[in-house]
Amino acid sequence: MTRTEFESLYTSLAPRLRSFIARQIGNPETAADLLQDTFLRLLRSPSVEVRTGQEITAYLYRTAHSVIVDHVRRERRARAWSFLMIRPSPAAPVRSSTSAFDQVFRSLTPRERTLLWLAYVEEMSHVEIAGIIDVGERSVKVLLFRARKRLAAGLKEKGFASEVFA
């Protein structure tokens, strides 16, 4: 991949990927770091030259999902170790105002957040989503149904009108 091709790809996909990551992590600074990790993995990928634009997009979302999961695991491990070592855990990022939707969205699993984001924000087909999260196309339909159901239940708990989810 040439520098020009990479810059074009970064310019077109970075804002969407940054939004995808930030919505799941809840911290814009961390999201920027994870975005860089995602693109770095693309540059280190040996088969990047033989990919089409759609394959690279799917690869980047799949990689971003993986980077997010790795980050969440590292954070959990750090909190567990800081608790076990009886040290104060690292200060959590200050969030001035988190909307009810953001709270409910972050309470979903990373896989559920990824499914909902790709389906409704990125407007990807079930086939495209299946390729990104590495499941069958029919599984995507079932997993999306369950994720929507959990999101709706969480929003109802926060007081959103139930007729919105009918």
Image (cartoon, rainbow, N blue to C red):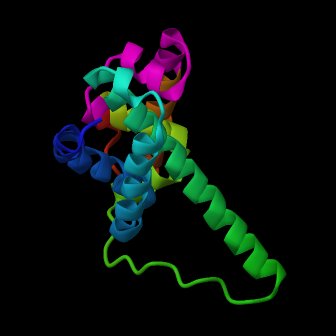
Name which quarter of the figure residue 57 lies in: top left
- In this view, the residue in front, 88 or 107, is 88
Identify the residue shown where x is 38% and y is 52%.
Answer: 21
Using the image, determine if residue 145 lies above or below residue 40.
above
View extreme (right): residue: 84
Front in this rendered view, residue 78 or 106: 78
**Residue furthest out toward the bottom:** 87
Q: Is residue 125 visible?
A: yes
59 in magenta: no
From the viewer's perspective, tell me whether residue 16 is left or right of residue 83: left
Horizontal and vertical percent position of residue 78 = 69, 72
> Residue 92's x, y, as percent?
51, 79
Judge from the rendering whether residue 127 lies leftward or rightward of residue 54; answer left or right.
right
Name above or below for residue 6 compared with residue 53: below
Report x, y in % for residue 155. Answer: 40, 48
126 inside magenta stretch: yes
Quick check: 154 above or below 56? below
Q: Main secondary structure of the magenta part?
A: helix
Instruction: Identify the residue shown where x is 67% and y is 64%.
Output: 76
Q: Residue at x 46, y 16 (%)?
A: 141
Q: What quarter of the picture does the C terminus occupy?
A: top left
Compare residues 142 and 44 and report the one nearer the observer: 44
Farthest residue, direction top: 138
The residue stretch that appears in magenta: 120-142
Q: Position of residue 135 (x, y in %)?
A: 56, 19
